[in-house]
Amino acid sequence: MTFPDYNLFCSRVAEVNARIAAACARAGRPVASVELLAVTKNHPATAAEYAARYGLRAVGENRVQEGVEKRPQCAAPIAWELIGHLQSNKARLAATHFDRIQSVDSEKLINLLDRAAAELGKVLPILLQINAGADPAKFGAEPADASRLLALALTKPALRVEGLMTIAPLSDDPAVARRSFANLREIRDRLAGESGVPLRELSMGMSGDLDAAIAEGSTQVRVGTALYGERT
Ligand SMILES: *Cc1c(COP(=O)(O)O)cnc(C)c1O
């Protein structure tokens, strides 16, 4: 799979949308309940242009600096979401240049992002990233800390918590990913019950495991490889 021209990109989106539709049908969910986020990391700004031209709402980037450099090169209007680990010294830059930050996983980041967003005069949408698969190799808050982080974030006037995000552990056994997706949904249901905030967004599932994620309630799948090919 190489980087596609626009026509090939369109047929790959159609294939991914067919997978999403099939998974929704199996789960008895409306197809419009799952959004496709195009993950453009390690690809040229053209990747974001394609997504915008197709009519997708948003693209996902892994690294702050890469998104900051690429965004001005993409003339087409589209939302930019940060899905990769955020270091505290980049919090202000991220709050300035991204429309939503999915990788919020510490009190320190919540404090810094709120301050930066307030100074920018905006309300910044965020997701809390939870290490729902207890993967030692992954970032994300521990499930046991999720209540505390949410409570703090809900006191911040310049942040809007829209839901949760997770990355499943890499495993040959598909049941491992599925369990971590189910776990994220259970954590969301518990937090929503405790806080009274709906936390509607469940960002979970990638090219290899989006079907299992949708079965467990994903509302946004983050797909790179199946759209743009292997990253170099
Ligand atoms: C790279 C990345 C993706 C996309 O992964 P693919 O397997 O290429 O679809 C999704 N989410 C995050 C957080 C990523 O870093």
Image: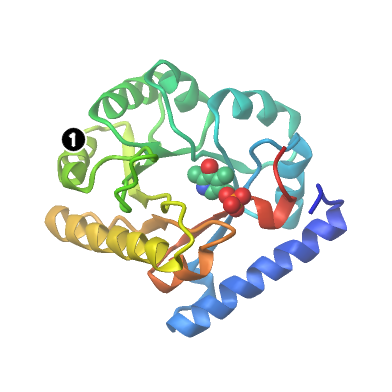
Residue shown at 64% from the left, 43% from the top: 78
Residue shown at 65% from the left, 55% from the top: 56
Q: How is the image coloured?
A: rainbow
Which residue is the site of mark 1?
152
List the single residue furthest toward the front. 172
Q: How far across and down, in percent of the image, does residue 227 sit?
A: 71, 55
Q: Nearer the viewer, residue 51 or 133?
A: 133
Residue 31 in the image: above or below residue 103 = below
Quarter of the figure with the C terminus = top right
Left or right of residue 226: residue 217: left
Residue 128 in the image: above or below residue 158 = below
Residue shown at 32% from the left, 46% from the top: 131
Q: Is residue 75 visible?
A: no
Left or right of residue 56: residue 84: left
Q: Amino acid at mark 1?
A: Leu
List the single residue furthest toward the top. 89
